Structures are given as structure tokens and as C-alpha cells.
Amino acid sequence: MTEHLRIGKNTIAFDVTGEGPLVVLAHGIGDSRHSYRFLVPGLVAAGYRVANVDIRGCGESSLGWDGYSRTDIAGDLVAVVRHLGGPAVIIGQSISGGAATIAAATAPDVISGVIELAPFTRAQPVDLGGLIRVKRFRTGYTRMAQVIVRGRLTDWKKYLDVAYPTKPADWNSELARIEATLSEPGRMKALQDMCKSKPTDAGTQLAHVTCPVLIVEGSLDPDWADPRAEGAKIIADLPAGLGELAVIDGAGHYPHAQTPDQVLALALPFLAKAAGRA
């Protein structure tokens, strides 16, 4: 059952399943909470209460927000945690990975751990060498640039094609869902605004995080020439001993939808420690 949390004049949509320590899921740009459809059952079966969130401007959450930065999204996620009763571990993908970092740094009383899937958490200098060397990265970079400039659904679908080097079994129906949502007036504009927001706000908060952090990268993620190196840089900017890195071979930018069993296998031991169940 979908719930709606009012934040100012807008609302955040989410659903809650299961019982136990709270885990909050937050997806990436142009997506919805449905992207976690394969992960939620395993988390619930393991004894967690799972709040699956449509971040602002996406899914069933409202449009017309004043901003779409990682700091803005972090504030929404903390509001959900406080509404439901924390503490919680946040699992955030892409832009929401950076938002999870900010949430952990600014609300340590209610955030007990963070799992970041293919996160944009650091400022991204132009990697000219990577663009020359790595075709996958060059293709993803070009297609994302077209999305930012033109805001066309066809360009977003081309980006998704490379971001999912292998497709889930239900990809046709999932792509139809994404198309339908992004065809709603204002949804693509929200996607573009998120694309244009810089991750500097998240990067500057890494040093202030006090809870454990797990970074999960896909080896074929087209958003970086070397996803492992990007993950290692995030770990290096955290306080010593807080971060760990895992790379899933063959996964792209959406490991939770492409390789959910592997993500769950990584997440459960981390969650047990962060939630004090280990």
C-alpha cells in the first residue's frame, strides 16, 4: 500500500513491507521504487522492515520541487526515516547513493549504515583518457549528455540500453513502465534537473560520515571508465575503517535489478552489523 509523506507543499511516495530493523531504499534518476522489485522480497524474508521510496519528482512522488540536489533528496530520506521511526540503513543507487552519504553525515542519530549502489558521490572531473580508451564509458557519456541537453525519452532509452549490459527477464514490461512514467508532463524535466546537479555536496560530506558504508559497483557500469577505481576513491574520502568496496562482475549501473542475488548476498552481512544483529 502506497503512503505519502508531505514535505512542504509536496509529497514523497513510499511503501513499507515486513517487520524488523528499518531499511530505506532510494533509486536513481529517471526511475522509481519499482527498480528494487527483486531486492525487497529477500530483505523482508531476512527480517527487515523495508521502506521503498520514490524520490522527489519520480514515480508517484509529486513534481514542482524547488530543487533536485542530493542534499534535497537526503532531507527527504531522513524525513521518511524519522516518520517511520529510525534508526535505519539507507540503500541508495546512483544520485541517491550521494544523498545517502549526506543523510548519514547530517543525521547520524537516525542513520546507522549506508549501502551505495553505483553511486555518484564525488565531483566528476572530465576523464578524457577514459573516454578515449573505454568504448563503454564513451557511449554512456555521450548518451547521457544527449539526455541532459535534449531531454528526450528516446535518448534516455539509449542510455539505459548500455547501462543494462544484460537485461532482467521482465525488461520489456519494465521499460514500458519507465516510458509511461517519463511521458508524464514534468517527469523528464525533473530527470534533467537531477542530471545537472553536481555531487560536490555529497563529496564534501564523506569526511563527516560516522556509520559503516558499503560501496557496490558494477564492473560494466558505463558511467565510469574504471568503476572499481571510482568506488575506491569514495572509500578513501571516508574516515579510515568505515568503508568497504565490492565490485560485481558483469553488472552495469543497476546491479540491484541486474544481479539482485549478488547484491543481497553483499547487503545482508552488512545490514546485520549495521543493525546490531551480528
Image (cartoon, rainbow, N blue to C red):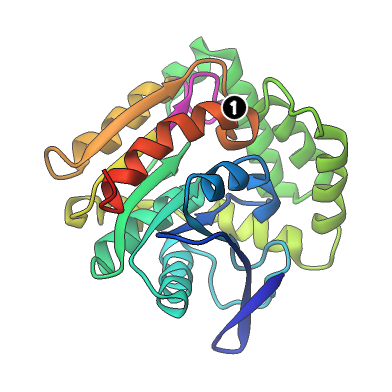
Residue 260 position, x and y percent, is 58, 32
Q: Is residue 128 magenta?
A: no
Would you say 172 lies left or right of 72 here? right
Residue 212 position, x and y percent, is 24, 46
* Residue at the disc numbered 1: 259
Residue 25 position, x and y percent, is 52, 54
Would you say 236 lies left or right of 118 here? left
Kind of residue at disc 1: Thr
Tally the marks.
Answer: 1
Q: Taking the image as drawn, is residue 244 in sight?
A: yes
Which quarter of the picture shows residue 157?
Answer: top right
What span is colored magenta in the figure? Answer: 216-225
Quick one: 144 or 118, which is closer to the camera? 118
Where, quadrant-wise, is the N terminus in this rendering? bottom right
As displayed, is residue 157 above or below residue 57? above
Residue found 48% across the figure and 65% down from its top: 73
Residue found 65% across the figure and 40% down from its top: 38
Residue 19 position, x and y percent, is 50, 61
Residue found 56% across the figure and 41% down from its top: 42
Question: Main SS type for the magenta part?
Answer: loop
Considering every residue shown, the one lying at the far top of the view is 133
Would you say 228 lies left or right of 168 here? left
Residue found 31% across the figure and 62% down from its top: 111
Where, quadrant-wise, is the C terminus in this rendering? top left
